[in-house]
Image (cartoon, helix red, strand yellow):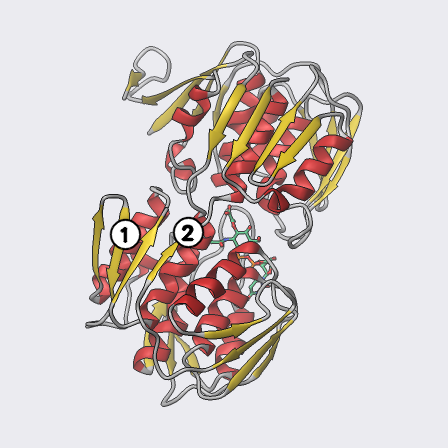
Amino acid sequence: MSAFKIQGGRPLHGTVDVPGSKNAALAILSAVPLIEGTVALDNVPDITDVHHKLRLLESLGAQVAWREGTLFIDCTELHSCEADEESVRPIRTSFYLLGSLLARRGYAKLPAPGGCRIGARPVDFHLKGLELLGAKVDLVSGCFVAKAERLVGAEIYLDFPSAGATQHLMATAVRADGVSVIQNAAVEPEVTTLAEFLNRMGARIEGAGTSTVTITGVARLTPGAFRVPEDRLQAGTYLIAGAITGGEVTVTDILPECQTALVNKLREAGAEAAEGPDWVTVSAPKRLKGIRVKTMPYPGFPTDIQQPMAALLGLASGQSVVEETIYESRIGHIPELNRMGAKMTVEGRATVIEGVTCYRGAIVETSDLRAGAALCVAALAAEGETLVKGLALIDRGYDGFEGRLRSLGASVRRLSLTERIGDKAQEE
Ligand code: EPU
């Protein structure tokens, strides 16, 4: 197991850029089987989820190559439309291949994705939508087997604006006959990015980024090039890392409008923020004040930033409440933050936080990707040394995390832990 050794108490200062968006890249990688020919993708983040997904595509027959930072994928010759448990379960978006394989080959068999440490994460909207598009989907021995002689345009209403279901069904409908309309669609920027990608390849999608998305099916897509936009969630994490340490951090080459919810809540807590056409700066006093935060679908406060935000509010004066409305159990960070001296309790869907004046270094372990980010930002502000274990989860979504934090003045080292933590830790 590996860990970050973080020496806390240094205010972060400086400017940092962020890599391409994990969630946009993963959605695009689920849609590439729709395209015959070589697609060139720039700014794909170097994270384990991407590498895992590429291995899965290769196992289906895709040709994958990296040349000078650009990812080339050719799905012309797909020799299989079936994936095994190991390649699908760890990455939920692998399941979104069901629609693109179905559209391309009329058949797909993929293991059902499991729940995870943030909630049950059902796929009922995906299945209902695929059936409306003309597929027959059966659950056979834990795998979804989908068949369709042809897909046909349909009107699909989502009971909740699910980002994944919108992406999956939008991409599938691109190769259906006729017009599809997705009502109550998610408006997350990663949905818009996927639509831009598909339109660049010849799809006809209108309204992405609004709650009604209209897709006019096309017979084939033509390969081309696309650049994955920067990751708004990594950007938000660095802004919080600056604020929790009482420093000043600028994140560049981003869309400031994607940070609106976070920036406004940080201002409400007493931080100062400024923004330009492609940057946001946040600076914070030594101590912020407690506030209420409620996660919502975009453009509301992102669930993926809720955990680092709770870490920040754990050091704010007075009481804070962080209400999670998207996932039922995105709370793995709480016992670990409490080990560091936080005073947090879970009441239903809310984390109630009594602000403390300091965190103290401890050995903590991450339960999921964003819990890992929360523990790291807490450690940056803590007195003394913290070991954050479970980096495999952080590496799923943060590209060059420790390097970027170090460039802002943080003391972060990646350790390979052998035997007893502490005396046997070795730097990698
Ligand atoms: N939902 C259902 N049925 C479905 C689909 C979703 O009930 O068929 C529910 C979910 O259980 C959840 C809500 O709808 O309560 C919203 O889930 P959504 O489908 O929007 O989430 P997702 O597409 O599975 C993506 C991101 C998540 C991010 C959410 C919300 C990817 C790979 N994942 O998940 O990112 O939290 O949207 O914005 O794009 C992360 O990056 O750490 C992460 C978990």
Residue 180 place in picture, x, y as percent: 54, 81
Looking at the image, which residue is at 29% across and 20% down?
Answer: 419
Residue 71: which numbered mark, if any? 1
Name the image quarter holding residue 311: top right
Q: Is residue 382 above or below residue 103?
A: above
Q: Quadrant of the N terminus?
A: top left
Residue 122: which numbered mark, if any? none
Q: Read off the residue under disc 2.
A: 228
Q: Quadrant of the C terminus?
A: top left
Q: Is residue 327 left or right of residue 169?
A: right
Kind of residue at disc 1: Leu
Mark 2 surroundings within 10 Å by alpha-carbon count, few (fewer than 14), some (14 through 19), many (20 or more): many
Q: Secondary structure at mark 2?
A: loop
Name the image quarter holding residue 381: top right
Contact (Cβ within 8 Å) of mark 2 with mark 1: no
Kind of residue at disc 2: Val
Mark 1 surroundings within 10 Å by alpha-carbon count, few (fewer than 14), some (14 through 19), many (20 or more): some
Looking at the image, which residue is at 64% across and 35% down?
Answer: 275
Residue 184 place in picture, x, y as percent: 66, 70
Looking at the image, which residue is at 57% across and 34% down?
Answer: 333
Residue 233 appears anywhere in the view? yes
Residue 185 place in picture, x, y as percent: 61, 68
Between residues 68 and 105, which one lies in front from this camera angle? 68
Residue 232 place in picture, x, y as percent: 53, 43
**Alpha carbon separation for disc pair 2 and 1:** 11 Å
Furthest residue to the right?
Answer: 318
Q: Secondary structure at mark 1?
A: strand
